[in-house]
Amino acid sequence: MRPDRESAGYTFVFAFVVCVACGLVLSFVAQSLRARQEFNAALEVRKSILQAARVVPGALQKVPLQEINSLFERNIRSVRVDSQGGVQAFSGAKDQNPSQEGNPLYIYHEQDRPVAYIFPVEGSGLWGQIHGFLALEADGITVRGLAFSSHSETPGLGGEIDKESFLKGFYGKKIWDEKSRQLVSVTIAKGRAADRVGSERLPYYVDGISGATLTGDGINVFLKDTLLRYKPFLARIRVGERP
Amino acid sequence: MIRLTRKEMTVLKEGLWSGNPVTFQVLGVCSALAVTVKVETALLMGIGLTFVAASSSLLVSLLRAFIPSRIRIIVQLLVVSVLVITVDQLLRAFFYAVSKQMSVFVGLIITNCIVMGRVEGYAMINPPRRAFLDGLANGLGYAAVLVLIAVVRELAGSGTILGGAVLPRELYEHGYVNNGLMVLAPGAFFLLGLVVWLQRALSGYREK
């Protein structure tokens, strides 16, 4: 005998069975693909570091995936910065080692000379966490590059932050005001920077994206927060100390 | 070779041509504007949607005798979501760069009216084999329009096809510039309008 398809009891049982079945399928899919996805995410982080430091001219899109790792290992050294700004060799098997004290820092070397310091930056955008990397030149003042490894901003608006056209605006900007001797960070303006601030402030401002004001505000906050956290270290490299 | 009955042939023809989901039913327009800047994303979106539409139609049709009518939409949605999440996870594992570009649009296949429309309107009242073909045909019909628009947009907007430069260098040296409008959503709007017009004119569709 077939149960009554429209009875409340059958409806509940059916809903329950379908939900459990769907749940099982999804957890199986997620579990079996997890390793590959994590591998991709880790690679994306390395790619962002290379992109921020501008190890390769132009976009990294064309570089084959296998080469990202070797490029990274050849050029980038990961270290930790303690609260006095001292640099310690990083003793982790992988990129992350939470047990070691200090803030993570990546150094881009060329012939044993540091070319860029790359700081992990992260904070809230409009919809969620934004992760990325800010690279400074060896002078500790000039921005070399910026790259975002993950975000969940609106495509076409806030999502444009990972476009080269926007990120290029950061190249050569300053985070340190020599006159007032202050860490000013670099700020995304609302609209065109030149319309918002006078020419003497222009080195600290970047053109914003229209329709992405809140995303930009979020980035401004965490860029500054990050730089403040590395203040002792930045002070050291400004006077020419080399880690 | 799989033999198709005449009825099944009609199902295929409707989805692909005379009842094309984009040009005839005018569904799935949002994603048709969003992922057609490059052929690659359009192609993958087309494949993703075709997979979801065909398999959800098949599954729902198989279940149709057991689904209580009061919760049928929720059950359909559940089946569609499971498939979409699977596609999203697969993309993340094997086409990471593309999945980043497609971002929210894969998730939005769930809300794509084509999938739900075919499932509720066709798969609920037709046998599995035909339901599968119907989903497949509608997915492919959608994909065809997407790829067509993407080819024009990528060619005119970036001078490339599937990322490879196709326009000769000399053209740019003689002052040719890429059409910036084609990269933006309004460009897709105009193109989509033209495609709808063209397809309707060719298929002899008359507004009733």
Image: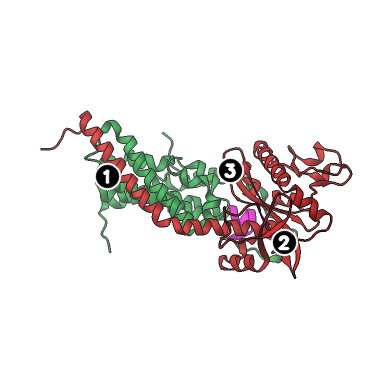
Left of B200 or right of it: where is B76? left
Please state which of residues B102 and B118 is positioned toward the viewer in this rendering.
B102
Chain B, chosen colour in render: green
Q: Do the numbered discs 1 and 2 sit on residues whose CB atoms are within 8 Å?
A: no
Tell which residue pokes out farthest to the top in this image: A8
Query: Which amino acid type corresponds to the residue marked 2 in the rendered image?
Result: Tyr
Residue at 23%, 36% in the rendered image: A13
Residue under mark 3: which chain is it in?
A
Chain A, chosen colour in render: red
Residue B100, given in percent of the width and then of the height, sits at 54, 52
Judge if badges 1 and 3 mark residues of a common chain. no
Left of B78 or right of it: where is B154? right
Please state which of residues B54 and A27 is positioned toward the viewer in this rendering.
A27
Tell me the quarter of the image containing the N terminus of chain B: bottom left
Give the label, 1 or 2, closer to the camera. Answer: 1
From this view, report whether residue A106 is shown above or below residue B126.
Answer: below
Find the magenta span and give its range. Answer: B153-161
Q: Residues within 10 Å of mark 2 (few under 14, many from 20)?
A: few
Mark 1–mark 2 distance (CA, rounded to whole Å): 54 Å
* Mark 1 / mark 2, whichever is N-terminal: 1
Residue B137, given in percent of the width and then of the height, sits at 37, 51
Colour pattern = by chain
* Residue wearing tag 3: A129
Tell me the element at label 2: helix
* Residue wearing tag 2: B172
Q: Do the numbered discs 1 and 3 sit on residues whose CB atoms are within 8 Å?
A: no
Is residue A141 visible to the viewer in this orientation of the structure?
A: no
* Residue wearing tag 1: B61
From this view, report whether residue A243 is shown above or below residue B84.
Answer: below
Residue B96, given in percent of the width and then of the height, sits at 52, 56
Query: Which amino acid type corresponds to the residue marked 1 in the rendered image?
Result: Ser
Please state which of residues A223 and A198 is positioned toward the viewer in this rendering.
A223
